[in-house]
Amino acid sequence: MSRAAGKTLTDCREFLSRCPLLEEVHIVVSRGLLHWSSALRSSSPACLLFPFTDNPVTLEDLRNTISKIGPIQLKDEEEQDYLRVLQAMHDSVQRILDEEDYYPIPDRVRFPREDIYYPAKEDNELGAWAWRYTLKDVQTDATTTGPLAGRTVCLKDCVGVADVPCLLGTEVITDYVPKTDATIVTRLLEAGATIIGQSVCENMCTFSVSFSAATGPVHNPYARGRNAGGSSSGSAALVAAQQVDLAIGADQGGSIRMPSALCGCVGLKPTFGLVPYTGIASNESTNDHTGPITRTVLDNALMLQVIAGADGIDDRQGAGCPFPKDVPKYVDQLLASRHKSLEGMKIGILREGLDMSSVDPRVHAKVVESAMKFKELGATVEEISIPLHKEGPIYHLTVGRMAGYLSRMGQASSRKELYLTELTDKFVPWTQQKWDKLWPTASNVMINGAYCWDKWPSLYGKTQNLLRKLRDAYDDKLATYDVIILPTVPQVAGTLGSQSDRPMDKLAKTVGQNLNCAMFNQTGHPALTLPIGMLPPHDGPEDLLLPVAFQIIGKHFDESTIYRAALAWEDRFNWKDL
């Protein structure tokens, strides 16, 4: 049924004669107004160009809309035509808005959400828990026979669990409760894991030091008052403190690897698309990754084996991504080659990664010393150079801020994935009250992004092109070398800042933290951080020892080789003694 207001009978007949899609038409007069209804030969709204009687779109709306495109004016004789089309668009869209959204339905019977509560301070010593609950399979024997049977898991607090509040580390919104479970949640449960809570993530997943969350700081398990890294701070802290067996993190610029490195964990950013991001709050679809944080390499491989594989929803999972049944049996592969020589493996130590300006000379030396230990395991180790590596951080920053701005403005588009529309609706429109609650990194993303889109509309596309050039540069070296090694973070864990600090003082704490991590989010190469030793902080005290780590970078979808190298090193050397 369509309606027309303020039209003459001649108007209606003239219009209807130009609509071949109309099969049957009825025109009636009621209360002095013309109304018409029709049956359509197709569902196309193309010919419904008479607005509903309550259509709110005005000529002023049309003119304001045109002005956003540029300094453009319609000809006088065109305005009424375009107004009618815009009004028709409004009426058509209203049908979508009135329809219930479409999310995967979680199995609340098999996987009941039990004992959901916000943890008391005395039960949250590190400040790393965001929410506590129990979620497991109660209908099958998975919790006793599955690959993750008996294992407890926490999820970074951007991973959706239906009916469990999600904080995203921010006070901008306080009432977001996901309607569906992330794909990886279901896979963990089907594998027999027991999920026991959400771990704190840094403010809107945009801070690399662990004091930005609205719930308060997350402390490093090795020293209270020290940085646990970000933005998956809670996940790494809880694993390192042995409060949970395994954890899920999310990584858009190093957010799995940095906290894992600072807390002495094994953290993997898988190949882009290997693990579905469905049901997880996104910053930017072209660099979203989710993956495991564990205490050992074998646990990490086991967890990846459970959560990897295409889910049919997330278009990040493109060419090369296996279906779940075809995911490599990483653990079986590792056990089959365990304690065997790495003879034939070629390892490159990346000079530019060591020379990043923020790298502590002691970390530089520890990474080189630890990488050279692969010679004892039978591998060939050589220094390599990829000059373009140093451009990676600015490429990542540009794409991340431009795309992050669109996402936070509710303008993310052009991807086939599960959109968390109810979360978008909570953020936009932006108000002064919401803005005042933003952490400086998040507000800076929006300011920088808005400026760049306005100033250089083609910048995003050009940067994506240059990122392909950077990816090719890594691939060129990986054609000769099996893996590449470089520092994960430039220093051991520093001291925490305060939420009351000025924006620049807060931002200063993050400088240089992800300079060796962020580029691999954009190129999509798998990257694993492995603890390799201990060092005192540069500002002391000398008797405080904190974890140091290096990254192992591999070919796309070749996590197996990364794991083989990492396990061989882990088996031979006790990093806490180095």
Image (cartoon, rainbow, N blue to C red):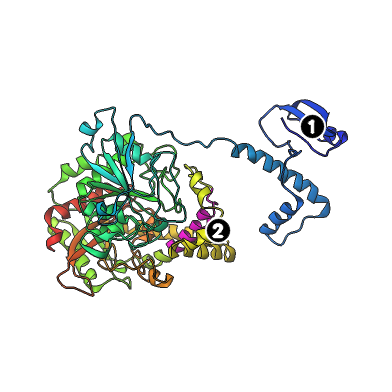
Q: Main secondary structure of the magenta part?
A: helix
Residue 466: x percent and y percent?
46, 61
Q: Quadrant of residue 328?
A: top left
Amino acid at circle 1: His
Q: Reading the chain from its start, which is encountered first: label 1 or label 2?
A: 1
Residue 411 is one of the magenta-drawn residues: yes
Foreground residue among 170 and 231: 170
Where is residue 464 shown, x and y percent of the image?
Answer: 48, 58
Q: Is residue 285 above or below residue 181?
A: below
Residue 395 appears in the rendering: no
Task: Look at 29% across and 32% down and name the residue there.
Answer: 137
| Residue under the image location 69 percent in, 54 percent down | 65
Q: Which residue is mark 2?
A: 431
Identify the magenta region.
395-413
Depth check, front residue: 23 or 152:
152
Q: Residue at x 71, y 62 (%)?
A: 71
Q: Secondary structure at mark 1?
A: strand
Q: Is residue 166 visible?
A: yes
* Res 532 quadrant in image: bottom left
Crowdedness near tag 1: few (<14), some (14–19) or many (≥20) residues, C-alpha within 10 Å: many
In contact (CB < 8 Å): disc 1 and disc 2 = no
What residue is pinned by disc 1? Answer: 35
Measured from the top left, where is residue 6 in percent x and y? 83, 39
**Amino acid under disc 2:** Thr
Depth order, front residue of 201/534: 201
Q: Gap between marks 1 and 2, in whole Å?
A: 41 Å
Mark 2 burial class by Cα count in 10 Å: few <14, some 14-19, many 20+: few
Q: Nearer the viewer, residue 477 or 416?
A: 416
Instruction: Specify whether 532 is left or right of 411.
Output: left
